[in-house]
Amino acid sequence: MARHSVCKVADVAVGALTEVKVGRSPIVLSRLPSGEIRAVGGRCPHQGAALRFGCVSGTTGSDTPNELTYGCEGEILRCPWHGFEFSLRDGLPTTPDSESLTLRLRMYEVEVDGDEVVVVT
């Protein structure tokens, strides 16, 4: 496994997307509200959109008519082309019954070494 120092910890903000390159491969970094930094492949598994143009949000849902609840704030990555949403925790799609979908984000291990973000490939 190769370790790649890709940026400073301060360059990765909560709720924002930061694109870095490992060789020619784009990788998108985001900091979760918990402070953890996540790294995912820079292309959407659906049709290859550049995820650096996506957005970080949460989920909405309801068990009661006329009432919405908001959850997973800052943990959902939405593709800029077709709005596919994926969890930054595990890379899985957020749609109900997502077990039947083969789409998932490519996740990379992230280590913090001093003030450097290191991606392990």
Image (cartoon, rainbow, N blue to C red):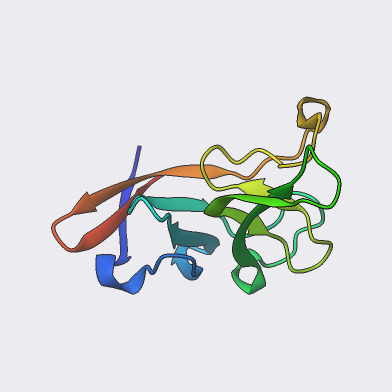
Above or below, 27 against 120 in this view is below
Q: Position of residue 77 (x, y in %)?
A: 62, 57
Quarter in which the N terminus is drawn: top left
Residue at the (46%, 44%) spot, across then down: 108
* Residue at far left of view: 114
| Image label count | 0
Relative to 32, 8 lies left or right? left
Residue at the (46%, 60%) spot, across then down: 29
Quarter in which the C terminus is drawn: top left
Residue at the (66%, 68%) spot, across then down: 54
- Judging depth in this view, the residue of 43 and 22 nearest the camera is 43
Relative to 28, 103 lies left or right? right
Residue at the (69%, 60%) spot, across then down: 78
* Residue at far top of view: 99
Above or below, 109 against 113 in this view is above
| Residue 20: quarter of image | bottom left
Q: Position of residue 70 (x, y in %)?
A: 63, 52
Q: Position of residue 46 (x, y in %)?
A: 80, 51
| Residue 31: quarter of image | bottom left
Relative to 65, 11 lies left or right? left
Q: Position of residue 11 (x, y in %)?
A: 33, 73
Above or below, 3 against 10 in this view is above
- Judging depth in this view, the residue of 74 and 82 nearest the camera is 74
- Judging depth in this view, the residue of 81 and 96 nearest the camera is 96
